Image (spheres, grey):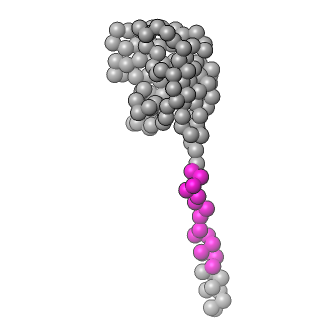
Amino acid sequence: MKRLAYILLSFSILLGCSNDDDSNPEVVLSGLSGKWNLVNVNGGFVGVNHDFENGIIVWDFNETNNKVVITNSNTDDTIEDSFPTGTYNYSILEVQGNQELVVDNRNLGNFEISGSQFIVDENFRDGFRFTFSR
């Protein structure tokens, strides 16, 4: 009887252990990895609508370290083009069932990705809608 108790105790200890390794957390990927061209900005209080050629403003996302490298070659300061050239931290928040993109602690609004295009939309607060493509 003691032998059966030891076997059951050993079995329950083995089943109760888990392989949690906090040093290697699971990365949830959004599909953003890689280079994206900012192709259109519209909205805002005055209702801008500006198209950019591919390569003028490029955002290069790294989902492993949650960094985005922005290369901004736009020289017209009168056109809204988001961020200047630099490397920024980013995150994606879940807010009331919607995903929102935050870059450098600035919430850019609702984030949607489909195929070779993603849109960040803050029009609901008189902000801008940024459209990106691969």
Q: Is-magenta flag for residue 20?
A: yes
Confirm whether residue 82 shows in the render.
Answer: yes
Q: Quadrant of the N terminus?
A: bottom right
Relative image position of residue 5 (x, y in whole percent): 61, 86
Q: On the rendered structure, is 58 left or right of 91?
A: right
Q: Is residue 36 above or below residue 78?
A: below
Rendering coords of residue 132 (x, y %)? 55, 19
> Residue 36's spot in the image, x, y percent?
59, 22
Task: Give the x, y percent position of residue 60.
Answer: 59, 27
The residue drawn where x is 55% and y is 28% is 69
Residue 129 magenta-drawn? no
- Residue 118 in sight from this viewpoint: no
Q: What residue is drawn where x is 60% and y is 80%?
A: 9
Identify the residue at image location x=59%, y=34%.
62
Residue 49, located in which quarter of the rendered image? top left
Where does the magenta region start and end?
10-25
For this rendering, which residue is in front, 9 or 59? 59
Q: Is residue 13 above or below residue 64?
A: below
Look at the image and tell me in which quarter the C terminus lies. Answer: top right
Whether 103 is drawn above or below 116: the answer is: below
Left/right of residue 95 with respect to residue 69 in the rendered view: left
Q: In terms of depth relative to the viewer, which is nearer, 96 or 66?
A: 66
Numbered disc total: 0
Q: Is residue 29 above or below residue 46?
A: below
Which residue is pictured at 66% across the width and 89% down the height? 3
